[in-house]
Image: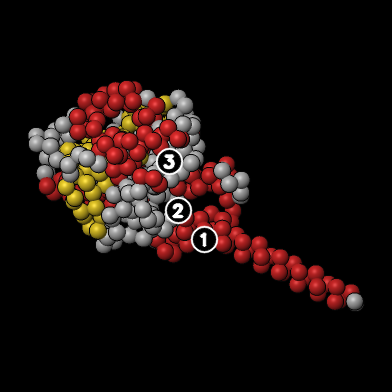
Amino acid sequence: MEIGGIIGVVIASLIVACAVIVGVFFLLGYVTFATFVRRRNNDNDLSKAPIFGALGPDFAKYREFVKEKAEEFEKVPFEWVSVQSKDGLKLSGRYYKQEGAPATVICMPGFGPSAYIDCGQFGNYWLGKGFNLLLVTNRARGESEGQYLGFGTLEAEDLKVWVAAVVAKNPEAKIFIHGCSAGATAAMLASAKDLPNNVKGIIEDSGYTRTWDVFVYQIKQVYKLAPFPILHIAELFTKKKAKYNFRASAVKAVAMSGVPILFIHGTKDKLAPTYMCNALHAACTAPKDILVVEGAGHMQSYMRATEAYEAKLDEFVEKNL
């Protein structure tokens, strides 16, 4: 074979190899988008909750703890309520009304299951204080409409709609927001977006700085891959289909917030590492407090240190009610 022919074969081989590599990265980016951003089914199936194994130590124990609390709280009477999001979705929630309640708590769940699974673990505590309780089912989850999750970015706008609905029913309502993981991030993002004075405080449990940061950490630490270009491709799909990106900064939001915030995090969180909580707490310019639970994984702080968690909630609520 002549030199020119050999060079042509080499070039063709390189082109094919590059095309294969690009195709693989494109596929991985799409799979990331499809797995984490698109709607998942069976959100109310306790056998599937929580869905992550990367939540830190005591995962099996935490899984059973969440299931037990959810099964217990599922028996508590409630009424379905709904609002319409700014982009026209019907969002559902479970409302637990108590006569003469001094405040209403809005619980925002995280990425995985529906609200009574994610937030039901706190239900009896809040009802025990005599508060009204609203367990929100996030968009693209459970009973709520939508095809794409917002990882806190879209849910921050939804939260504002829920707050407005509570205030519309009672202009004098006092509101606390208790968010978990993505729900905590939604609450922090919303805190910089003109929440009414009715909102007296935010409890953020296992929130994160940015969706981008969580994905980078997971891709590197769990999957042992380089974020580029997988995450960039996933973000392109998200921008196209779900109309948002992964860059909304909770750090910037809490730096502009006027709402008191209680930060709660575990030292063994493998989904949103503890440095994120420290950065958020440091940046927050509003009245703030923090509880870091030694040895707790993602959203495991209540299970691992129930008394300390409830004592910190008591202190925070009493100070800001």
Q: Is residue 296 above or below residue 210?
A: above
Closer to us: 57 or 42: 42
Q: Which residue is mark 3?
A: 208
Colour scheme in the image?
Answer: secondary structure
Mark nearer the viewer, 3 or 2: 2
Element on which disc 1 rests: helix
Could you tell which of marks 3 and 2 lies nearer the N-terminus?
2
Element on which disc 3 rests: loop
Q: Which residue is mark 1?
A: 30
- 119 to the left or right of 212: left
Q: Position of residue 215 (x, y in %)?
A: 50, 47
Which labelled disc corresponds to residue 115? Answer: none
Cα gap from disc 3 to disc 2, whole angstroms: 16 Å
The amino acid marked with disc number 3 is Tyr
**Can see residue 279?**
no
The amino acid marked with disc number 2 is Phe
Could you tell which of marks 1 and 3 lies nearer the N-terminus?
1
Query: At 61% from the left edge and 45% from the top edge, which residue is drawn?
Result: 224
Closer to us: 280 or 299: 299
Element on which disc 2 rests: helix
The amino acid marked with disc number 1 is Tyr
Query: At 35% from the left edge and 48% from the top edge, which residue is drawn?
Result: 45
How many numbered badges does the structure rendering display?
3
Q: Is residue 83 above or below residue 3?
A: above
**Within 10 angstroms of label 1, few (less than 14), some, or many (20 or more) residues?**
many
Q: Quadrant of the N terminus?
A: bottom right
Q: Position of residue 111 (x, y in %)?
A: 39, 47
Query: At 71% from the left edge and 69% from the top edge, which residue is drawn?
Result: 16
Q: In this view, which residue lies farthest toward the left? A: 100
Which labelled disc corresponds to residue 36? Answer: 2
